[in-house]
Amino acid sequence: MKTLGLNMNNNSLKKTPNRVAKMFVKEMFSGLNIQSLSNLSVFENEYKYKHMLIEKNITVYSTCEHHFLPIIGKAHVGYISNGKLIGLSKINRIVNFYAKRPQIQERLTIQIVNYLKKILKTEDVACVINAKHLCVNSRGISDIDSITVTTELSGSFQKNIKKQEEFFYHIRIS
């Protein structure tokens, strides 16, 4: 702010550095605190549900680690139980946890899949993220319409074309 020549004695600006630091630590980058990902309910699949479970249109708010500008989009996550299930809102919490840090979308997509594989003890996990990167949309090329899509497929989502098609069909319909 000093480099920009802003008057740091201005009542509107003098507390801004503290506000920004607090926002980064408590909100924007809360995913750097492992405690943010506690109390995730994983339980036995007592109903023996064998098909894919998909949580789609999960809001993603992240920050580009290259420019510290927002990444805003939707994540679509699916898995096939291998005996374990997770509370539905916990999928959203996992997406939010990994998004709330300086991030690149490719890594975010992989982190979500890897974490779910680990806690659910299944290889059958998929994630697609569609997002606008304000570093692309508002600076440099300033392409307001571009959207970045990343995909991470594992297990039967990667090996079985019918499972892939089913997953992609479900995330396309509203």
Image (tube, helix red, strand yellow):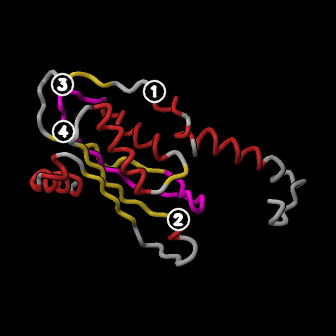
User: Residue 134 bears which disc, if any?
Assistant: 2
Q: Look at label 4 and name its amino acid.
A: Ile
Quarter occupied by residue 105: bottom left
Please state the horizontal and vertical placement of residue 62, each as a whole percent of the image.
50, 52
Q: Residue 80 lies in magenta, yes or no? A: yes
Q: Residues within 10 Å of mark 2 (few under 14, many from 20)?
A: many
On the image, numbered disc 1 is attached to which residue?
A: 38
Front tag of 3 and 2: 3
Name which of mark 1 and mark 4 comes first in the sequence. 1
Q: For the point 82% across and 64% down, which residue is it?
A: 3
User: Compared to 167, does 66 lie above or below?
Assistant: below
The majority secondary structure of the magenta stretch comes to strand
Name which of mark 4 and mark 2 comes first in the sequence. 4
Q: Look at label 2 and name its amino acid.
A: Leu
On the image, numbered disc 4 is attached to which residue?
A: 80
On the image, numbered disc 3 is attached to which residue?
A: 45
